[in-house]
Image (cartoon, grey):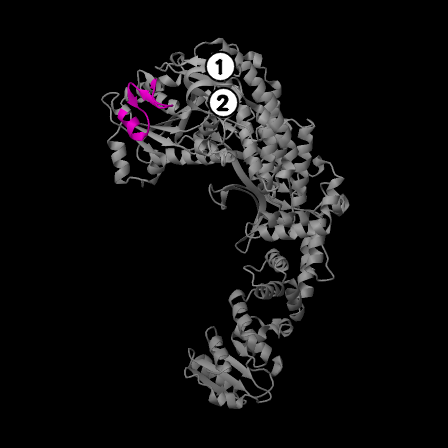
């Protein structure tokens, strides 16, 4: 089918009569060969009235093509003018035929002539045809031409600009510039950009525009009088778009280097850039400044927390959050050590109580600081702070605590075996809380899960929906090592020593899971089992193995060994805090796995704790106890043997004074002393009587049948003030109540937008905030934010403030709330906030 026939057929889908003027009679041959069987073709030859009579009265439903081999007459002499107005004319010049094909009005002919090159490409033409509408004006059509050339998803100007910027980031902007010039669209594009963003760009160079855009959004460079809200809003939205964020990062870093932003920041105080997040150098500068101020004690922990709160929603925070968190842990540790008075310790019992209620925090913050230090990319930035933390933790905390604590250990011939003794664990926890109450229970024993780790785990579990955890503690026996600790957690009447350090309960060996399962099953009429955490984790939910384990047993002991295994190896001991992080994650997954098999009750505890110092221990720090006699077992922190002699570096216990049925003697180094031992690790130690070694957690965990976690609500105050009259509009947010253990905060993203052509167009910057204040005063939970408004609209009755919440575990956001506003801008003033 010819192109003329195709064009005519398209016209007949909307019209019954088509008129065709051919003054030069160039298409007579084409007319003779037209294959339009359903169409009556008439050549008009001074018989207009007869033809009108036929078309309108005789054949009112028939389709006609009126071919007129002459010039179109004036309106006064045109007998077919009424037909023209009610039907349509077929034009055969190239532009007109293309307009007919595109179904665009003929007044766009002059616009079309400028785009001749564009439409020479059949591919471009086909794609453009899918985008346009007969109602499109010239501006919209130009944007859609750009949409095709830039391969953009939408034709709005910001999308087109972002795709141009992406081409720049991909080193393809020269080709784009050449393409826009070639298709007569460059001037149009940059005029529109200047209208919207207020930044003229005579060079038509994308990087010139980007340099101006970034500068006019950053007061330290441009000055307050040159600052543009439109620039601030545009860049805020670019950062917020997840798909565009990598492009923004690349462009921002290049501009920061070219403008020497690092030098600009050197002369600026921290407070002036706390709300800025245009360049990564800003985040680096703040981190370095906060470290300096923490080291010289200008900033306390409260101030550091305030800064983190201000920065946590900023674009670059994610890359530097470990630095901020490490700084906070460091200052918390320093402050806690400085305010602690070890004279509070009055007895062994008060020492245990003080450690489990407050002292543990120092060890926790030390561990967290070291873990964070290992995770940052440039640990050298934190190195001065690390050296200070290491010094005060090792020399002031551990040594001073050891000296004060050892005084009370020395006073007691026997070790502690009161109500909080680990020896009572089975009777006071497993039996009384579960067996006697006819409840099934899984007991998870994590090797070397010291108390401070258990405290963090307890808080983590309580943040899991439908889980409740309560924290308690127990005191291990001495020596505080695996064999004795594991045995103490089983039911027994007497503990005795075998060869070396083998432990027997009521004459039965405790070595290995089969031996421990045997002891559990001999404790009464209950059925029990022992299993490794790895084997249990391999069971599929509701599998036969899992069903058998649950249905056939009342008590299941689950053993896991990540922390102790890592720390006890000289090669891997420096990674022990990494192992703690893995263990915390693993234990949360483990309780969820267990509860999925309809187990509602679980207990987590440990056999012993440990001490860890990140710095290598100097040779002078090892104690030579001058031990002689028959030695059955020894390590850095204890010696088991008979007829032992020693010096003042250790304290001797008779085994019976440690509730062990044996005539053996046990030596425990005093305080922090480490015994010399060839080949053994020295930074990770346990076996002695330090609080970190002997206080272990007991977590009583229950799976609830109803939700246990809820979120606070967020609203805005003074909803009646819903008119936006300037391009700086304040909004006051209100958090309904303080956060608590089971009432958590919300992370919300807020912005103003209008809906146009079914598309949401953001007209303000984007404000992201974690509403997680624990303040009791309602006024302290209010938060004011000044939105920057940038739009060509001056009046609009339906502008909405959108509040969105991130879907947990994803990068997607859903609407949390929205509030209607009216836009009634007077003369635009882009400097209202100055």
| Residue 692, placed above or below residue 819 | above
Q: Which residues are magenta?
A: 496-518
Q: Which comes sooner in the sequence, label 2 or label 1? A: 1
Q: Locate residue 565: give its quadrant.
A: top left
- Residue 798 visible in rendering: no
Q: Which residue is nearer to you in this view: 795 or 4? A: 4
Residue under circle 1? Answer: 651
Question: What label does residue 692 carry, if any?
Answer: 2
Crowding around mark 2 (Cα neighbors within 10 Å: few <14, some 14 to 19, many 20+) is many
In percent of width and height, residue 34 lies at 47, 86
Crowding near the residue tagged with mark 1, few <14, some 14–19, many ≥20 C-alpha atoms within 10 Å: some
Q: Residue furthest front?
A: 629
Q: Position of residue 253 (x, y in %)?
A: 66, 50
> Is 468 or 642 nearer to us in this picture?
642
Pointers 2 and 1 in contact (C-beta within 8 Å): no
In 3D space, how far apart are the residues under numbered discs 2 and 1 (Cα atoms)?
Answer: 18 Å
Check disc 2 and report its element: helix, strand or loop: helix
Residue 508 on the magenta segment: yes
């Amino acid at each position: 089918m010819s192109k003329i026939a195709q064009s005519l057929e398209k016209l007949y889908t909307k019209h019954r009569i088509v008129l065709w003027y051919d003054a030069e009679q160039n298409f007579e041959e084409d007319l003779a060969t037209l294959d339009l069987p359903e169409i009556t073709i008439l050549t008009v030859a001074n018989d207009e009235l007869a033809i009108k009579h036929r078309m309108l009265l005789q054949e009112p439903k028939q389709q006609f093509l009126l071919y007129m081999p002459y010039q179109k007459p004036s309106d006064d002499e045109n007998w077919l003018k009424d037909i023209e107005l009610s039907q349509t004319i077929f034009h055969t010049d190239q532009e007109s035929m293309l307009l007919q094909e595109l179904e665009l009005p003929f007044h766009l002919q002059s616009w079309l002539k400028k785009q001749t090159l564009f439409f020479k490409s059949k591919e471009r033409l086909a794609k453009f045809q899918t985008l346009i509408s007969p109602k499109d004006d010239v501006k919209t059509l130009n944007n859609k031409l750009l949409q095709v050339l830039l391969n953009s998803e939408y034709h709005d100007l910001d999308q087109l600009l972002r795709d141009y910027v992406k081409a720049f980031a991909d080193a393809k902007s020269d080709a784009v510039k050449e393409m826009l010039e070639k298709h007569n669209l460059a001037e149009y594009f940059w005029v529109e950009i200047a209208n919207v963003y207020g930044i003229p760009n005579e060079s038509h160079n994308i990087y010139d525009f980007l340099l101006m855009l970034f500068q006019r959004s950053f007061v330290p460079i441009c000055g307050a009088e040159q600052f543009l809200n439109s620039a601030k809003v545009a860049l805020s939205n670019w950062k917020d778009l997840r798909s565009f964020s990598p492009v923004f990062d690349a462009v921002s870093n290049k501009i920061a280097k070219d403008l020497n932003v690092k030098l600009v920041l050197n002369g600026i105080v921290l407070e002036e850039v706390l709300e800025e997040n245009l360049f990564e150098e800003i985040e680096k500068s703040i981190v370095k400044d906060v470290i300096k101020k923490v080291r010289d004690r200008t900033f306390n922990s409260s101030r550091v927390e305030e800064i983190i709160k201000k920065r946590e929603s900023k674009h670059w925070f994610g890359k530097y959050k470990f630095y901020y968190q490490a700084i906070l842990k460091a200052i918390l540790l320093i402050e806690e050590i400085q305010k602690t008075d070890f004279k509070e310790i009055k007895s062994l019992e008060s020492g245990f109580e003080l450690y489990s209620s407050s002292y543990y925090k120092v060890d926790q913050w030390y561990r967290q600081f070291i873990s964070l230090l290992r995770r940052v990319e440039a640990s050298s930035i934190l190195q001065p702070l690390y050296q200070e933390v290491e010094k005060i933790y090792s020399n002031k905390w551990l040594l001073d605590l050891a000296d004060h604590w050892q005084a009370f250990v020395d006073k007691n011939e026997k070790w502690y075996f009161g109500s909080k003794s680990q020896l009572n664990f089975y009777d006071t926890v497993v039996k009384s809380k579960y067996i006697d109450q006819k409840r099934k229970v899984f007991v998870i024993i994590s090797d070397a899960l010291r108390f401070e780790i258990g405290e963090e785990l307890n808080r983590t579990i309580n943040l899991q929906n439908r889980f409740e955890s309560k924290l308690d503690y127990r005191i291990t026996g001495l020596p505080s090592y695996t064999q004795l600790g594991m045995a103490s957690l089983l039911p027994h009447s007497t503990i005795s020593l075998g060869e070396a350090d083998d432990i027997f309960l009521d004459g039965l060996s405790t070595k290995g899971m089969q031996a421990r399962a045997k002891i559990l099953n001999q404790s009464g009429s209950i059925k029990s089992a022992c299993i490794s955490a790895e084997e249990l984790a391999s069971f599929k939910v509701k599998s036969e193995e899992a069903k058998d384990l649950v249905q056939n047993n009342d008590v299941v002991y689950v053993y896991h060994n990540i922390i102790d295994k890592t720390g006890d190896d000289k090669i891997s001991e420096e990674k022990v805090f990494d192992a703690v992080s893995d263990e915390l994650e693993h234990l949360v997954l483990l309780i969820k796995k267990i509860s999925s098999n309809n187990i509602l009750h679980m207990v987590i505890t440990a056999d012993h704790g440990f001490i860890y110092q990140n710095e290598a221990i100097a040779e002078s720090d090892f104690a030579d106890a001058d031990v002689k006699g028959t030695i059955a077992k020894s390590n850095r922190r204890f010696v088991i043997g008979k007829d032992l002699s020693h010096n003042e570096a250790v304290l001797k216990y008779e085994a019976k004074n440690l509730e062990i049925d044996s005539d053996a003697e046990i030596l425990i180094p005093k305080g922090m002393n480490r015994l010399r031992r060839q080949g053994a690790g020295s930074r990770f130690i346990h076996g002695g009587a330090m609080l970190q070694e002997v206080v272990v957690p007991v977590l009583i965990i229950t799976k609830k049948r109803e939700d246990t976690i809820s979120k606070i609500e967020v609203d805005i105050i003074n909803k009646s003030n819903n008119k936006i009259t300037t391009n700086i509009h304040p909004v006051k947010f209100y958090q309904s109540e303080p956060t608590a253990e089971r009432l958590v905060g919300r992370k919300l993203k807020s912005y103003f937008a209008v809906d146009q052509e079914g598309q949401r167009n953001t007209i303000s910057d984007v404000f992201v905030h974690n509403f997680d204040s624990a303040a009791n005063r309602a006024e302290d939970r209010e938060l004011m934010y000044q939105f920057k408004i940038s739009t060509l609209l001056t009046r609009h009755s339906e502008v909405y403030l959108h509040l969105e919440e991130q879907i947990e575990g994803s990068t997607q956001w859903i609407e949390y709330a929205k509030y209607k506003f009216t836009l009634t801008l007077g003369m635009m003033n882009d400097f209202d906030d100055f």
